[in-house]
Image: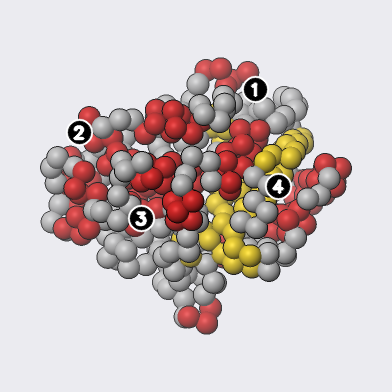
Amino acid sequence: MPDPDTVAALARETMEATGAKGLAIAMIDGGEVRSVQAFGLRNANGEPLTPQTIMYGASLTKAVFGYWTAMQADRGRIDLDAPLAARLAKPLPEYGNLDAYGNWGDLAGDERWRVITPRHVLNHATGFANFSFLEPDGRLRFHFDPGSRYGYSGEGIMLLQFAFEADGGARVGEGVAADLFAPLGLKDLGLMWRPEFAANLADGWTESGEIEPHDERSRVRMAGSMDVSPEAMAALAAAMVRGFGLSPAMRAQFAHPGMAITTRSQFPSLQDEAPEAERFPIRAGLGVVTFDGPQGPGWFKGGHNDSTANMMVCLEMGQRCVVVLSNDVRAERRFPKLIDALLGGTGMPWRWEYPEADY
């Protein structure tokens, strides 16, 4: 693994090339955190970004949810391949459109919701758009049969959270904290806003260089509500790559190359399938995407919004990972060069994840 000085030089090169104001990099080897460094600013006041600064985790939350769901399956609390409908006391559409979860009432008259499984959800194969508010009429609907193909969907992730919590079920946020965060001794993170975060909080910068205040999310939403420090995210990635809390068989399922991914890029989420010759050799795992390259199998998950750019890439051989968190979305276009310099050639499908990045 590169030494801290080399990591710092690559970080500064990335920031100079993109204009990004803040960047944090964690290096993991042998399933253990080897270094966590932060560079630049956390806000417009010029206060420094540190390894303990609370940043927006964005869709890295989905990978954490996938891992925690695997823990529940390992303990017999959920069957990854049993329809979620079996967990509900009444038909899904009868719960109506719920502000905290999703517009389940919109599915009335389409029985395909009955066959959706946790694996479909975590493989992004529910058939839903990313979110129903992106539909022209704002209504949730199926675009393809569940389990038939890949199509990234935060709405699907929320369906799995709802299935855990419906009809008096335990709150997922409390379960993740008890089963994962607490045993790892993690404190600088949470699945919803906590007032104590304000003392060392990262705001963000957009593509145009405008400052965007950190969003104080008031609900646990496993599609992307996690706030997390670079140190805490590094510890989570290290735990996941070494299989913390999972049997070897279930750890293998977490990053098992399952559902084939047949699109030219991650987004737009409902694009047509590409001709076979134009597809990347990648498959969906449980909340992550798997690949195989010159250093063997690996998996990754990104996180993005208008002012956030995150990426976690892990290699099974040597239990090695790089975690990059930025509170400036402009850093993202240099992630392929940065992470390849840190990990070496991995076979990461960069053009699928970042079609417009610098190469």
Nearest to the eye among marks 4 and 2: give it.
4
Q: Earlier in the sequence, mark 1 or mark 2?
A: 2
Q: Residue at x 59, y 20 (%)?
A: 198
Q: Residue at x 52, y 75 (%)?
A: 279
How far apart are labels 1 and 3 at the CA level?
37 Å
Nearest to the eye among marks 1 and 2: give it.
2
Q: Amino acid at mark 4?
A: Asp
Tell me if mark 4 has few (under 14), some (14-19) or many (20+) residues whose alpha carbon lies within 10 angstroms of its own: many
Q: Earlier in the sequence, mark 2 or mark 3?
A: 3
How far apart are labels 4 and 1 at the CA level?
28 Å
Q: Is there any visible trace of residue 227 in the rendered image? A: yes
Q: Are marks 2 and 3 in contact (CB under 8 Å)?
A: no
Q: Earlier in the sequence, mark 4 or mark 2?
A: 4
Checking the image for residue 167, the label placed there is: 2
Q: Amino acid at mark 3?
A: Arg
Q: Secondary structure at mark 1?
A: helix
Q: Is there any visible trace of residue 216 in the rendered image? A: no
Q: Is residue 103 above or below residue 49?
A: below
Q: Earlier in the sequence, mark 4 or mark 1?
A: 4
Out of 204 and 167, give the one closest to the viewer.
167
Q: Amino acid at mark 2?
A: Asp
**For mark 4, what is the residue?**
29
Q: Position of residue 22 (x, y in %)?
A: 72, 38
How far apart are labels 2 and 3 at the CA level?
21 Å
Q: Position of residue 295 (x, y in %)?
A: 68, 64
Nearest to the eye among marks 1 and 3: give it.
3
